[in-house]
Image (cartoon, rainbow, N blue to C red):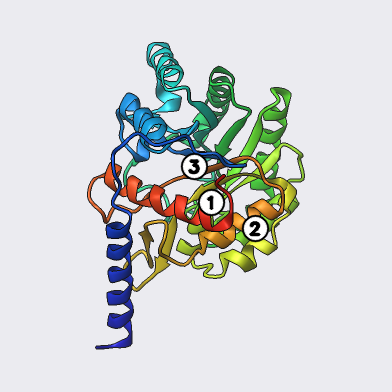
Amino acid sequence: MSMLSRRRFLTTTAAAAIATRFTPSFAMAAPVNSPFKLAVITDEISPDFDHACSVAANDFGLRWVELRGMWGKNLVNMGDDDLAKAEGILAKYKLQVTDIASPLFKAYWPGAPQSRFGPKNDWFGADFGYKQQDSVLEKSIALAQRFKTNRVRGFDFWRLDDQAPFRAAMDAKLAEAANTFAKHNVIFLLENELDCNTATGREAARTLSAVPSANFMLNWDPGNAVARGELDAFPVGWNLLPKQRIGHCHVKNAIRNNSASGFAWQPVGTGVIDWAAQFKALLQMGYRNGVSLETHWNGGGSAEQCTRTSMAGMKQALQQAGAIR
């Protein structure tokens, strides 16, 4: 067996073992007590928002959720009737919202060569052009206010092979948006996203330095950094980050491989990121904000089954870190 084949075999076997070990019972879960605001992105469970919230509250024992889409629609595209229905469902399950996972600035940068990292399909109903971004920003602020959160996730445009000629202008646009958010007492959470210009811990440290606004913070996603090739995202990339500017954390895992994309998502509990160590580091810095499962891995059955497996792995890592009481 070649070294590469052996590595692929071991990775696949490990993922299967994790899925088997964490096959969940569907009994009502006791509420989870943690210094973090433990959450899940609801549409990673199901587009049926009522069902997703039932799983989050009753099966996972969560008190928080992150909102991106529901009933097959991106939150930014939803009308008042659907939003009112969502508010009622959140109240029904006694759930609060960590942040609005908006698609802000997931767009092509004008005047630059068209990014090869732009969307091949509109996975999350979030295909908004550059000229629509002011509207996305305004709607995101209104959604944050409606769902009683002070945080909105966003990005910094589809990734360019050479950012240098455009980077200062992109930073200025981020700073402008941060100023708009600040007027409404809302924090702009920049996610390090593998297909956008800030994808890794190293890049995130640079962007945070370039945009020093107090309400411009990082949605730290080490899994995305690994997918972009930063295999030392934790702890090396992490150690470069200004800790006081981490405002949210996404939980998923990945490995690098020889596929066309160069990586594969993994269930939490296997993959490059040592989540027990990452949770412990968050605890040690005094972090008390959102820690949200963003499953992405789809190798264990339905989206709900995959999310259940990753949530079990996430809880095990939290226990190992002493982050579940």
Work out whether 272 lies above or below 314: below
Cα distance, mark 2 to mark 3? 29 Å
Identify the residue position indicated by label 2 in the image. 281
**Side of 185 relative to 277 (left or right):** right
Q: Residue at x 69, y 40 (%)?
A: 216
- Mark 2 secondary-structure assignment: helix
Q: Residue at x 38, y 11 (%)?
A: 81
User: Residue 299, image x and y in percent?
Assistant: 27, 56
Cα distance, mark 2 to mark 1? 38 Å
User: Residue 140, image x and y in percent?
Assistant: 54, 26
Instruction: Name the residue type under label 1.
Output: Ala
Identify the residue position indicated by label 1 in the image. 112
Quarter of the image with the N terminus in it: bottom left
User: Badge 1: how crowded within 10 Å, few (<14), some, or many (20+)?
Assistant: few
Nearer to me, 177 or 237: 237
Identify the residue position indicated by label 3 in the image. 106
Q: Nearer the viewer, mark 2 or mark 1?
A: 2
User: Residue 160, image x and y in percent?
Assistant: 52, 57
- Mark 3 secondary-structure assignment: loop
Instruction: Name the residue type under label 2.
Output: Ala
Q: Nearer the viewer, mark 2 or mark 3?
A: 2
